[in-house]
Amino acid sequence: MPDNVTSLFRSTAAHSPSMAALTRESDGAGPVDFCIPCNPYFPTPAMFEEMASRLRDIITYYPSSADTITAELCSLLQLPPQCVAMGNGSTELITWIDHLLVRESLAVPVPTFGRWTDQPMETGKRVDMFPLQESSGFALDLAQYAEFIRARGTRVAVICNPNNPDGGFLHKHAVVQFMDAMADLDLVVIDESFLEFADAENEPSVVHEAMLRPNVVVLRSLGKNFGLHGIRFGYLVANPALAGRVRSMLPKWNLNSFAEHVVFMLKEHGAEYAQSLHQVRRDRMDMSGQLSSLPGLTVYPSQGNFLFVRLPVGAEGTVVRDRLLTEHRILVRECGNKIGSSSRFLRLVVRPQVDVRRLVTGLEQVLYGTSRRGAAVSEQATGTAYSSGTAAVDRLVSQTNGAGTRGLAQAAGAGMPLPAAASAPAVGPGGGMPVPAAAGLPQPEPQPVPQEAPRPQPAPQPVPQPVPVPQPVPVPQPQPQQFPQPAAYPEPAPQPAPAAPPLAPAAAFAAPAPSPAPAPMQVPPATGPTPPGVPARGGLTAAQVRGTDGLSMAPATGWPGAQSWPDAAGMGQAAG
């Protein structure tokens, strides 16, 4: 592709340029797309042919009302229409959530989908950004997140599950426990836009739990999992009052005729859709293995239809992105403009194996080969002990949240020095998978790396002696911990266990028995939701939240049967 096509990336603040713009600036043929997180196997060619045959009618006539289209979708997903609001893409629903339900402040882990930080800031809200740590593989620790929310006094909490761009996954019981711990907040949002691609458990969604709670909204995408970003449609699920409040503000014809046609044809293609999700999950495991074989490239575990990778030391993401595009016609998502990330990271969408082989070949030539342009340039020094991504978060958070936030970030581990190659997490026996450092253990003294210019270092501090690690290196099990009990929210005096409320039986809130660990979790008897204002007890470690050791790829199980249609909770439903 011509070199001038890369100029389109300079004019986009938070997203990559559209495929239409890239195609216009090239010779008329778009690149192989590893950037836009779209299902490559759905709709099927036959479905596209059917839509093409109806194109004249679809674009000529008005669609039915949003209520009609929503009712059809709810019939397909076995959801009550009064608990659902459909929007022209999930970003339209995020906009209305911000306008209607976010009064003053919103907490969100970063890096994540940009609209969760940008939208509330555009309307003058305070955005409390909780930095996910590179040293722990960007895993979200719900206990630390709860403590952060209480310390900041935030009124709205957001969780993206799986998270974009890293694909981090939280199990259902952990999310429900967090929701109940935050029962006194104005709102808890669970963004499940990529959850259809997860296979870590059979029923990962919390949509049914959200309908029973007064302050929970679940956001779901249709464009991503159906492979139809251009149609712009998604939906939210909440109790009837919350869903109705959003639905009342939406235009009567906010959904277009393409959205209507697709929704009404889906009931005939449940088996093909289920098979497409199955194939994406298999491709994800295969693609992860191929990328992990590249020297110095770190691949993080993902439950989305994308993989988050860290480039080798000395490689700069914008250079890698531009050379892949101009020399190999491959489009990737460089994550330097994502808050909480840096240009050492790429998000790569899962694609068929033939495309992955082309990607791997291109990366080999750009990262390790010799050419007239030379190797990728090294990352610029940040002048701080933080990694470049964490430093960017710290600067922005300190500007938007006021004084004291730097101390909170450091308390969570953001201040861990990451000099040169020593900043890379340990590599597990699976090959290329990052191993989070065990909490509280002293880390080995970093070693200088000649390939990269020395960065300014903070004042000398006593360096703990390294802990000898036996060979082979086992996967460390993080120490279990409980949701924090901040001083402002003391735990109430012990009372006789009340009976479980009718809509929330005890079994719904009891966490399953954790996997063996050095110190077993101390989970109190399940007695229903945690009282408002008190963080949940019996919290989960990051590894337990992600499943087993938090590092290995999940087994390829849990997708719907070939003759069924997945309902909103991820289980199979008979088509019809």
Image (spheres, rainbow, N blue to C red):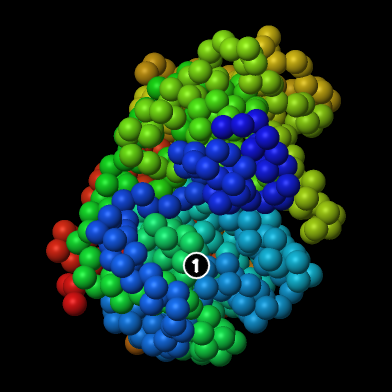
For residue 84, above or below residue 566: below
Residue drawn at (47%, 81%) of the image: 85
Quadrant in the rendering for residue 273 = bottom left
For label 1, the SS is loop
For residue 117, above or below residue 444: below
Taking the image as shown, residue 433 lies to the left or right of residue 110, namely left
- Specify few, some or many for label 1: CA neighbours under 10 Å numbering under 14, 14-19, or 20 or more: many
Quadrant in the rendering for residue 484 = bottom right
Q: Residue furthest left?
A: 563
What is the quadrant of the C terminus in the image? bottom left
For residue 562, above or below residue 371: below
Residue drawn at (41%, 28%) of the image: 358
Q: Is residue 376 visible?
A: yes
Residue for badge 1: 232
Q: Amino acid at mark 1?
A: Arg
Residue drawn at (65%, 47%) of the image: 338
Image position, residue 31 (x, y; %): 49, 39
Image position, residue 36 (x, y; %): 50, 49
Taking the image as shown, residue 350 lies to the left or right of residue 31, namely left
Image position, residue 92 (x, y; %): 58, 72
Residue drawn at (59%, 12%) of the image: 371
Image position, residue 357 (x, y; %): 37, 28
What is the quadrant of the N terminus in the image? top right
Which residue is more in the foreground, 446 or 450? 450
Q: Is residue 501 visible?
A: no
Count numbered badges in the picture.
1
Which residue is more in the foreground, 117 or 317? 317
Which residue is more in the foreground, 296 or 574? 574
